[in-house]
Image (tube, rainbow, N blue to C red):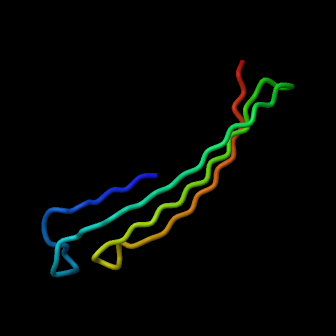
Amino acid sequence: MNYNRSKYAGIEAAYTSERNDETMAISLNGNYKIKEIDSDLVVSISRTKNNSNLPIYEYKRQQVSVSVNHRF
């Protein structure tokens, strides 16, 4: 889990205030060893939420990735 608070310098051109963001991210990773082919199956899931005092910078993001790592 990760939490970050950011304050940006200066006034945002389209607004009359400074930009202040709070970002929270959580991720889960898993590995499964495939002995027959000397490889690993890797699955990652993450979710990020960014809150901002300026609505244009607010977002939610979910990502899923699956990969196979093979050793030579």
In the displayed structure, 70 sits above or below 53; it is above
Left or right: 35, with 2 as reference point: right
- The residue lying at 28 percent from left, 76 percent from top is 53
Image location (x, y in percent) of residue 4 = 33, 56
Residue 64 sits in quarter = bottom right
Image location (x, y in percent) of residue 45 = 61, 53
Residue found at the far top of this picture: 72
Marker count (numbered): 0
Image location (x, y in percent) of residue 61 = 52, 65
- The residue lying at 50 percent from left, 55 percent from top is 26
- The residue lying at 29 percent from left, 77 percent from top is 54
Residue found at the far left of this picture: 10
In the displayed structure, 35 sits above or below 64; it is above
Left or right: 36, with 45 as reference point: right
In the displayed structure, 51 sits above or below 35; it is below
In the displayed structure, 4 sits above or below 13; it is above
- The residue lying at 15 percent from left, 81 percent from top is 16
Quadrant location of the C terminus?
top right
Left or right: 56, with 45 as reference point: left
Residue found at the far front of this picture: 1
Image location (x, y in percent) of residue 30 = 66, 42
